[in-house]
Structures are given as C-alpha cells and as structure tokens.
Amino acid sequence: MAWRSSGRTNAELISNLYKSQLITSDRVRASMTSVDRAHYAPAAPYEDSPQTIGYQATISAPHMHASASESLLPFMPENKGAKVLDVGSGSGYLTHVLANLVCGADGKGDGKVVGIDHIPQLTELATSNMRKSEEGRRLLESGKVEFVTGDGRKGYVEGGPYDAIHVGAAASEMHPVLIEQLRAPGRMFIPVEDAEDRGMFGAQYIWVVDKDEKGEVKRKRDMGVRYVMLTDAPK
Ligand code: SAH
C-alpha cells in the first residue's frame, strides 16, 4: 500500500499521498509540500518508506508523518501561539512539518515546536538538516524551533504545557509525565508497545491521549504500527 505513494520529487510524493488519501487535510498537504524530505532523508527521500539515519534511528515513512500530523491537527491552529513537543525528533523532518503547521509555511506566525532526542549527534543532525532551507533557518534563528538533547520520556517541562505532543518511538507505557505536560485541552499521539498483548499487528499500537478543558484524560487505541523503541541513552 505505502509504496504506491512514492514519487520522483517531493511534490509528487505528497501529491501521491494525497491521492491515496493518506493525507486528507489541505494544511498537512501544504506543510509537507513545503518541507523537502531530501534535506532529512539521506537515501531515497521520495519513497514512502522509512530510511535509516544512523545511530540506530530511522526517519519514519511519510505516510506515518502525515497520519501523526493529521491526528494532532485540531490542536495545532496556525498563528495562535500553539506549543508542540516532538519526542524522538531524529532527523528533524517532522519537527519542521509541525512548525510549518503552527507558524505557517513562511515560518512567520506565532507558535513553537521543541524537538527532543537523547542522542546529541541527532539533535545536531536535525539542526543542520533544518538549516538547509531558508525557512528552516528562520525557524531556528527566531527560536520557534528548538532542538534539545535529553530523555524524551520525561518530556521537556520548560517548554510546556503543550497543545500537542508527538512521540516518534514506541514507549513501554503511556508516561504520565508527558500527559502532565499536555495543556487542557491538548492531545498526545504515542506508539505504545504492550509486550503482553500481541494482537494481529504485533504488540505496538498508536494511542491518542486527549486531555479536555477540565483536565480529564481519555485514551483511545488506534492502528497497529512498527516503531523503534524509546530507550535509555546509549553510554
Ligand atoms: N520522528 C523521527 C523518528 C526518529 S526514530 C523522524 O522521523 O526522523 C526514533 C528516535 O527516537 C531516534 O532518533 C532515537 O534516538 C529517539 N529516542 C529513543 N529513545 C529516546 C528517549 N528516551 N528520549 C529521546 N529520544 C529517544
């Protein structure tokens, strides 16, 4: 299914994802069109598949980035000062897409995205990837995008509370500290591995965690997925 959406250029990849209805929102389509995946994926950037980026990390497949962005979209209005946390930011690709959603494609709107990864070489890589475009440089220089090195399982309380939290690696639990750092209302998109409950698609599922205005939390299990694990930092 996923491979059919590949393209020869970034525009073609995104257009094919849209035709296959793996992207349904015009805002997500515009945001992904304006970020060249070749700045973030070293090989075959316009294939709808994950690619290794070193340090045992991968850049996720474009259809997963689309799905995460669409799920969080209602909590990421443009130019309203929305705050977003991207846990396991890796290549920095999704961090850039999320920043375009909250700040607008020209990066001039009011919003902020923090990308956190526990491998310092990857936060450096994400920064240099983002510096490849003028819009990316503007987002970094204005402080609307910040990459920090740290254990994403603890979130990043300094930048919160967050309207939206994306987790880009499979967690072993729902991590209550991340839920605490959600704004009321806010939403978290998190893959969780349940070693006990091996379903049809394996043991990992996306969970969508919603906190309402009153602070009440509801969790909903979504599709089966395959992510690398959220782990302890390598020694
Ligand atoms: N969203 C990224 C996904 C990268 S893969 C992208 O598409 O490019 C998952 C990332 O999670 C890796 O970069 C890995 O270093 C990071 N990671 C794993 N455990 C972590 C932890 N405890 N804290 C922060 N980052 C973590």
Image (cartoon, rainbow, N blue to C red):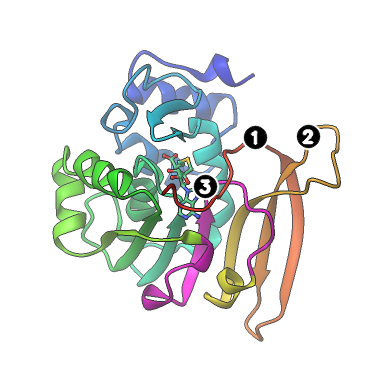
Q: Earlier in the sequence, mark 2 or mark 3?
A: 3
Number of the label disc, if any, that sits on residue 226: 1
Callout 2–callout 1 Cβ contact below 8 Å: yes
Position of 105 relative to 47 (above/below):
below
Extent of the magenta region: 153-175
Q: Earlier in the sequence, mark 2 or mark 1?
A: 2
Q: Is residue 154 magenta?
A: yes
Q: Could you tell me residue 123's position as x and y percent? A: 30, 49
- Mark-to-mark CA distance, 1 and 3: 11 Å
Kind of element beneath mark 3: loop
Q: Estimate how packed mark 3 is, as few (under 14), some (14 to 19) or many (20 or more) residues with alpha carbons within 10 Å.
A: many
The answer to whether residue 167 is left or right of residue 138 is right
The answer to whether residue 219 is left or right of residue 120 is right
Q: Could you tell me residue 41's position as x and y percent? A: 34, 28
Name the amino acid, label 1.
Answer: Arg
Number of the label disc, if any, that sits on residue 202: 2
Name the amino acid, label 3.
Answer: Gly
Number of the label disc, if any, that sits on residue 35: none
Kind of element beneath mark 2: loop
At horizontal 67% and vertical 64% (from top left) the residue drawn is 209
At horizontal 16% and vertical 37% (from top left) the residue drawn is 132
Q: Which residue is mark 3?
A: 168
Name the amino acid, label 2.
Answer: Gly
At horizontal 59% and vertical 21% (from top left) the residue drawn is 2
- Mark-to-mark CA distance, 2 and 3: 18 Å
Does mark 3 have its CB less than 8 Å from ligand 1? yes
Q: Is residue 183 visible?
A: no
Position of 205 relative to 52 (above/below):
below
Q: Estimate how packed mark 1 is, as few (under 14), some (14 to 19) or many (20 or more) residues with alpha carbons within 10 Å.
A: some
Q: Is residue 68 visible?
A: yes
